[in-house]
Image (tube, coloured by chain):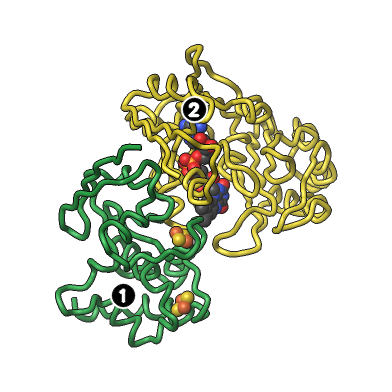
Chain colours: A yellow, B green
Amino acid sequence: MPVIVKSFTNAGEAAAALSSEREARYLGGGTLVMRALNEGDISISTIVRATDAAMTRIDATGSRVTIGASVTFARILAERDLAFLHAPARSIGGPAVRNMGTVGGNLFAPIPYGDFTVALLALDATVAIQGSFGGRDMPLDEFLQARERQGGALVLSVSFPRIAGESFRYRKVARIQPKGGSVITLAAHLPVSSGRIAGARVALGSMAPVPTRARAVERALEGRALDAATIAAAAAAATEGTSPGDNALASAWYRREIVGVHLRRLLSGQE
Amino acid sequence: MSKIPLQFRHNGREVAIFVDGGTNLLVALRELIGDMTPKFGCGQGGCGACSVLIDGALHLSCLTLAETVAGRSVETLDGIKQGPQLHPLQRAFMENFAAQCGYCTPGMLMAAKALLDRNPQPSRAEVVEAISGNICRCTGYEPIINAVLAAASGGRASA
Ligand SMILES: Cc1cc2nc3c(=O)[nH]c(=O)nc-3n(C[C@H](O)[C@H](O)[C@H](O)COP(=O)(O)OP(=O)(O)OC[C@H]3O[C@@H](n4cnc5c(N)ncnc54)[C@H](O)[C@@H]3O)c2cc1C
Ligand code: FES
Ligand code: FES
C-alpha cells in the first residue's frame, strides 16, 4: 500500500512532522522500516526523512565524542579515532547492512538486534532528542527504559566521554559466523586508576527486552583489581536483575546459563 | 495518491521514472526499469539476492526506499559486463562452478565486486566477510569463495 513520504533538509522540521502525526514513522537507514513496509505493515501511513547534514556528523576531537543519528556502521568503521567501536560496528549484519543501518536506528532495534546500543550503554552515552517541546539530552539508560514511549521524538545524535580505547571490551555471542543475530551481547568499560577499577560500566543485550546495565556486575567490579577473585564475583552476579526471553536463537534458560561464562571470558580478555 | 518523479543513474545511464510512495528500489529496478538482474528472495534483508551498488557501496535494494537514490548512481549485475565480454568475476564464477541454480549469483557478484573494487587482493577471510550477507542454498559457498579469489589473482596476473 502506498505511503506518504515527507523529506526535510532540516531536522527541526522533520521532528515537527514526526510529532504531529501518530502514524508517521521516521526512516533512518530503513533496514527495519522497509522490512515492515515490505511485509505490508499497515500501521505505517507516513514516512518522515531528514537529510540534515548535522545528523551525519561525527565529532571525535573534543573531550566528548558525538555521533549523528544518521551515521552508518560503515562510517564508524572508517573512523580511526573510533577504533574501540569497530568491534561492535563490525558485529552488525553483513556489509550491505553496515552500509545502510544507522546508529540512531539501532537505538530502536528490537531483540535480537541493538548490538551497537549495548556498546553505547557501557560508554555512558546520552541521547540528544528533538521533540515537539524542543530539544533535550537524556541518559541512554533512561531513554531505553522508556523507548516504547519515545514515538514522535527524533534522535539527533548520541554522545559519550572520550575514553582510552583499551579500557573498553565488547563481545557478541552468535550462532552463525561471521554474521548472525545475538544470543547475548556484552560490553564493558573498565577504566583503571592506581590498579583498581574506577567507574565500571557493564551492559548486556538480549538479557532483557531492551539493552540494560548489569549493575550487580558493576558493583562487584568497582574499586577492585581485575583479578581472578573479582572476575569470579562479577560472573556470579551476571544474571542479577536480568529478564531474558526465549527466541529462535536461544531460550531464556540457556541465556541465563551462559551469560556468566561469556562475562568471565570478556573480563579475562579471552577470545 | 500521486506518483513521485525519480531520476538517477542506472548502470551509467540517466533514467527517469514515477514511483508510488514507499516503493523499494528492487521493485523500481525490476518492474519500472525492466532490469531483472537483481532478484527478489525475501524482501527482508536476509538473503542478499537483491544486492546492488549505490555510489559504489553495497546495498540491499529491497530495503532501500526508491526515492533515496535520487541523483545517485545505481549499479546492478546488468551493468558489469563490458560489451559482449563477461566481467572477470563472471568468468571466474563460470570456471569455478560457483553457480548452480544461479538465484544468488547476481547478489554474490555485486558483493564480490564491491569487495574487489576497494580491495583487489583480498584474503580468504575478507572474501567470506564480504559475502556474509548473501545466502546460497546450492553451492555450499566454497566454489563462490574460490571464484572470487581466482578473479582477484587473475586480475593480478593480467595487471
Ligand atoms: C539482514 C539484517 C541483519 C541485521 N543484523 C543486525 C545485527 O547483527 N545487529 C544489530 O544490532 N542489528 C542488526 N540488524 C538490524 C538493523 O539493521 C540495525 O539495528 C540498524 O542499526 C537499524 O538502523 P536503521 O537506520 O536501518 O533503522 P530504520 O529501519 O531506519 O529505523 C528503525 C526504527 O528506529 C526509528 N528511528 C531510526 N532513526 C531514528 C531517529 N534518528 N530518531 C527517531 N527514531 C529513529 C525508526 O522510526 C524505526 O522505528 C540487521 C538487519 C538486517 C536486515
Ligand atoms: S530480497 Fe533483498 S535481501 Fe532478500
Ligand atoms: S547457486 Fe543456487 S542459491 Fe546459490
Element assignment for label 2: strand
Identity of the amino acid at label 2? Val
- Does B14 sit left or right of A107 as displayed? left
Disc 2: CA contacts within 10 A as few (<14), some (14-19) or many (>=20): many
Q: In the current view of this chain or complex, which residue is farthest to the top? A: A133
Disc 2 residue lies near ligand 1 with CB under 8 A: yes
Residue at image position (68%, 38%) is A210
Residue A130 rendering spot, x and y as whole percentages:
48, 20
Q: Which residue is mark 2?
A: A155
Residue A84 seen by the camera: no
The one nearer the camera, B2 or A230, is B2
- Element type at mark 1: helix
- Residue A169 point in image, percent of width and height: 61, 45
Q: Which residue occupies the foreground of this view, A107 or B145? A: A107
Residue that appears at 33% across and 87% down: B95
In this rendering, the answer to whether A137 lies above or below A1 is above
Instruction: Decide which of A169, A71 is in the foreground and name it.
Output: A71
* Residue neighbourhood size for the residue with mark 1, other residues' Cα within 10 Å, grouped as few (<14), some (14–19), many (≥20): many
Residue at the (48%, 57%) spot, across then down: B43
Q: Chain of mark 2?
A: A
Q: CA distance from mark 1 to mark 2?
A: 42 Å
Where A117 sits versus A63, above or below? below
Q: Amino acid at mark 1?
A: Ala
Q: Is residue A270 visible?
A: yes
Q: Nearer the viewer, residue A226 or A8?
A: A8
**Label for residue B152?**
1
The circle drawn on residue B100 is: none
Position of A141 with respect to A102 (left or right) is right
Task: Give the x, y percent position of residue A93.
Answer: 51, 55
Label 1 is found on which chain of the structure? Answer: B
| The C terminus of chain A - image quarter | bottom right
